[in-house]
Amino acid sequence: MTGTLIEIETLAKDYYRGKVVIPVLSDISLQIEQGDFLALMGPSGSGKTTLLNLIGGLDTPTLGSISVGGERIDKLGQGQLATWRSRNVGFVFQFYNLLPVLSAEKNVELPLLLTNLSRRERKKRALAALAVVGLQDRAGHRPTELSGGQEQRVAIARAIVSDPGLLVCDEPTGDLDRATADEILELLQLLNREYGKTIVMVTHDPKAADHANHCLYLDKGSLTGSQTV
Amino acid sequence: MKYLSLIWSALYRKPLRSFLTLASIFVAFLLFGLLQSVSVAFSEGVDFSGVDRLIIAPKYSIIDPLPEKHALAVKAVSGVELVSHRNWFGGVYQDTSQFFPRWPVPPESFLAMYPEYLLTDAEKTAFIQTRTGAIIGRPLAETYSLELGDKIPLIGDIWPNKDNTVWEFDLVGIYDVANDSVETEQMFMNFEFFDEYRQWSQGTVGNIVVKINDPDNSAAIASEIDRLFANSSDETKTTTEKAYNQMFAKQVGDIGLIMTGILSAVFFTILLLTGNTMAQAIRERIPELAILKTIGFSNISLLMIVLCEALLIVLVGSLPGLMLAAVLLARFSQSVAIFNGVELSGLIVAQGVGLAFLMALLVGLPPALRAMRLNIVDALGDH
């Protein structure tokens, strides 16, 4: 660990359904160290994914502040947040969310389209990312030609291809069988240990959480406990 | 350019849907190329440049007759080399569905005027010397299995004969043509016999054809001829063969208005179809668009990507349509008299491309705005 990467203070998030205010998160304060692998756990509706979205800059808080790498992302506008995400965060979702008409390589290359890299360099980096997840030989395959585990590996390659410091993962193993889930979690561990990625992962699965360094528990929008694994 | 593979891939998402959309746009722009070219040709002014044959028609209506003696007066106009005339016969051969143009003409001057109708010397002589003689094109002869010496009976619907019986002409020549632009399915018969035997209007003709000795002087000669008959009871309007053919076609109605009406209906339908297809395609891809936003694509980037997709679809469909229109018009103008000189001009191509861009904007903008305003959390949450 080399200092605090994410600092959250008195964070609150409300949603509105018509005129009805629905508080989802309230008074959340926490710090996440650089290079940590943190699991967020809690029952459905506890606010795990909302907190993850706020950390990843997909949403903005109602109250409080979020700093990532010293930058107040709660102060950024939509355009600035998009740029910030492209440079600093990789995303992994439960259902992979790959573009079905593109090959694995082209899916991985997508974040690099936002850079000024040449076509050749983009291809080189996409193949390197696929190599990290062990799928270099499937670069030309489309998502429909891959297994669920392979699809999730491609999604992880897409998340790391622009070399962000932070990976946010929303139930990355929720759609996989146990053995494949373990392989994905080991890959995330590898990225955390060998490549120094800070990982924040939402999961329902205690066995998945076992792969993290720390666990935070949420219930009804509040932090209720923490545990070092 | 780096987004091209992403934009291009949209075409492969639902190949059948893409094909059908492209096909409908292709047909719409093919029609645009053809109809707009015809419409422009019918609305433009008469171009006299380079023509050595002029048609003298009645000034106010092409169905009015002209006195045959006009032909004699025209002969005296400086620059006029040859004069002939023709008359629309109409008529029915066997039944009304078997229509082909029939023209009583003075054989000698007609054959001199139109060397592109190829007959043997014996046939030419027979046509000139036979009062009831007629000639037809070879395809027509083959269609009706007609041979030299056959009688051709015609019911004179416009021109009944003095006995109120069926006209009978003797087939004395079957002509070939010197080039593809000459109409082959026509019948020409001896004017003298026609004029004597018809019930009324003796001494009149439908229009007069003149050959001039200097094509560069055609406009001046046309003016001179019309001036000759100005303020008479039979004023004339002298024009080119192409313009006359178009005038003839305009008897059907306002060609430009008809073409515009058809094109408007076609494009309105295509606009609705393509717009609906684009909207549906974007609806289906909401999660994918949300992912693009998640990884950092800006709102403007997504707007442009969707607009470019719409433009790509419209251009891929429309450009081949315009190209085929150019090819077809080039062929028609060689082989169909009414299309003579009709071409897909650079201006019409430019209008077509402009229309394609406008169409892309109209069908692409609503889904593009939707993509731009997409809320990532909602879109991924729904997924």
Image: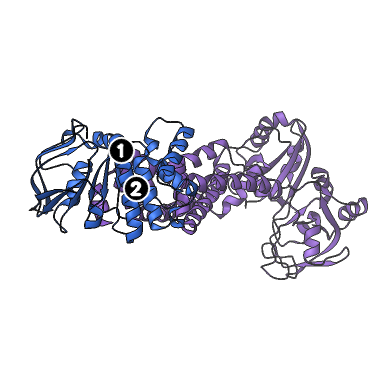
Chain colours: A blue, B purple
C-alpha gap between disc 2 and disc 1: 30 Å
Q: Give the secondary structure at mark 2.
A: helix
Read off the residue under disc 2: A187
Q: Residue at x 32, y 55 (%)?
A: A182
| Depth check, front residue: A50 or B185 | A50
Relative to B111, is B82 above or below? above
Read off the residue under disc 1: B298
| Residue B164 in view of the camera | yes
Chain letter of the residue carrying label 2: A
Q: Give the secondary structure at mark 1.
A: loop
Determine the residue located farthest toward the front in the rendered image: A229
Q: Position of residue B56 (x, y in %)?
A: 68, 42
Q: What's the residue type where badge 2 is placed?
A: Leu
Q: Position of residue B12 (x, y in %)?
A: 48, 52
Relative to B60, is A35 above or below? above
- Left or right of A76? Residue B337 is right
Q: Residue at x 44, y 49 (%)?
A: B10
| Depth check, front residue: B326 or A17 | A17
Determine the residue located farthest toward the right in the rendered image: B122
